[in-house]
């Protein structure tokens, strides 16, 4: 079985056919999904979705794009949401220096505050890092201990990857692994320790080849697994076994099976 460790299928993009999306995912062998929030409203939506689907879990957080709204009131709400039984992580949190939709000091402040929250309640963190690799790794190293760090949609170079793996972090990979020009990314994941990789779609974003330009969805995850299997020189079933085990450990779900 495959696990989509990061998607957003509670978004309006899926409102018209959510049931069909889930049915296609299950038919494709995707046995579990993590719905990831990016602000208070979406975090609540992720929880509602997970509550009504037994094979789904939720992560709650304020994304760096919305960091200027991560004030005391929002953080108090997050402190309540993290105790919901279907919440398995704090994320996605981090830094985005590509779009810079919130001031960088606000991004760092929100990032550090949510790391503290995750540490206090014993939840892993799901990290958004775009064009801020050095700063992200520094804040993680400087921050409190958390059960696990998942670098969602990993996009840094081999050096950063090796540093992350040495620290025990997990690296998430999705559609970009299949893109024709993603030679460096494929070489990075060819060398990845098999116990440090998670599969994800980030649906509705980043659809794999040959679905680029369309809405992404969890049923496309086997395309990512197939590309990773080719890089590792193993059968797809072996990729599924490895990445599902990694998912259960990263999100501390082994006891919930």
Image: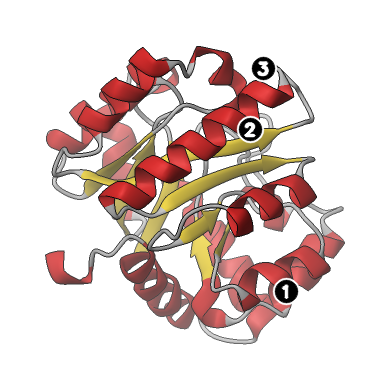
Question: Is residue 234 rendered to the left or right of residue 52?
Answer: right
Write down the residue under mark 3: 102
Q: Residues within 10 Å of mark 3 (few under 14, many from 20)?
A: some
Where disc 2 sits, the SS reads helix
Q: Would you say residue 217 is visible in this rendering?
A: no
Question: Is residue 256 rendered to the left or right of residue 159?
Answer: left
Q: How many marks?
A: 3
Instruction: Report the mark closest to the observer, 2 or 1.
Output: 2
Question: Is residue 174 rendered to the left or right of residue 12?
Answer: right
Residues tagged 2 and 1 counted as in contact (Cβ below 8 A): no
Q: Would you say residue 50 is visible in this rendering?
A: yes
Q: Earlier in the sequence, mark 1 or mark 3?
A: 3
* Quarter of the rendering occupied by the N terminus: bottom left
C-alpha gap between disc 2 and disc 1: 24 Å
Where disc 1 sits, the SS reads helix
Where disc 3 sits, the SS reads loop
Whole-percent x, y for residue 91 in the image? 44, 40
Q: Residues within 10 Å of mark 1 (few under 14, many from 20)?
A: some
* Quarter of the rendering occupied by the C terminus: bottom left
State which quadrant residue 102 falls in. top right
Instruction: Please give the name of the residue rendered at 49% of the width and 63% of the height, measured from the top-left corner.
Output: 198
Instruction: Please give the name of the residue rendered at 38% of the width and 31% of the height, measured from the top-left corner.
Output: 9
Instruction: Please give the name of the residue rendered at 21% of the width and 29% of the height, measured from the top-left corner.
Output: 80
Q: Earlier in the sequence, mark 3 or mark 2?
A: 3
State which quadrant residue 53 falls in. top left
Determine which of the numbered discs, if any, sits on residue 162 in the image.
1
| Nearer to us in this view, 110 or 228 | 110
Write down the residue under mark 2: 108
């Amino acid at each position: 079985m495959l696990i989509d460790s990061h998607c957003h299928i509670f978004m309006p993009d899926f409102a018209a056919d959510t049931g069909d999306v889930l049915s296609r995912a299950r038919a494709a062998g995707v046995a579990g999904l993590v719905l990831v929030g990016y602000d208070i409203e979406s975090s609540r939506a992720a929880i509602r979705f997970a509550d009504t689907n037994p094979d789904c879990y939720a992560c709650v957080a304020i994304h760096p794009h919305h960091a200027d709204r991560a004030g005391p009131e929002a953080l108090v709400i997050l402190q309540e949401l993290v105790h919901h039984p279907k919440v398995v992580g704090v994320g996605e949190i981090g830094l985005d220096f590509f779009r810079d939709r919130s001031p960088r000091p606000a991004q760092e402040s929100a990032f550090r505050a949510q790391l503290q929250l995750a540490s206090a309640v014993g939840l892993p963190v799901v990290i958004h890092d775009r064009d801020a690799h050095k700063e992200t790794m520094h804040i993680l190293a400087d921050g409190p201990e958390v059960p696990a760090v998942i670098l969602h949609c990993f996009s840094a170079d081999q050096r950063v990857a090796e540093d992350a793996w040495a620290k025990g972090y997990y690296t998430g990979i999705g559609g970009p692994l299949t893109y024709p020009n993603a030679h460096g990314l494929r070489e990075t994941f060819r060398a990845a320790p098999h116990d440090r990789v998670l599969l994800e779609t980030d649906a509705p974003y980043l659809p794999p080849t040959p679905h680029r330009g369309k809405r992404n969805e969890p049923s496309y995850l086997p395309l990512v697994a197939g590309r990773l299997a080719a890089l590792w020189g193993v059968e797809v079933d072996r990729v599924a076994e490895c990445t599902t085990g990694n998912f259960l450990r990263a999100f501390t779900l082994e006891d919930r099976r």
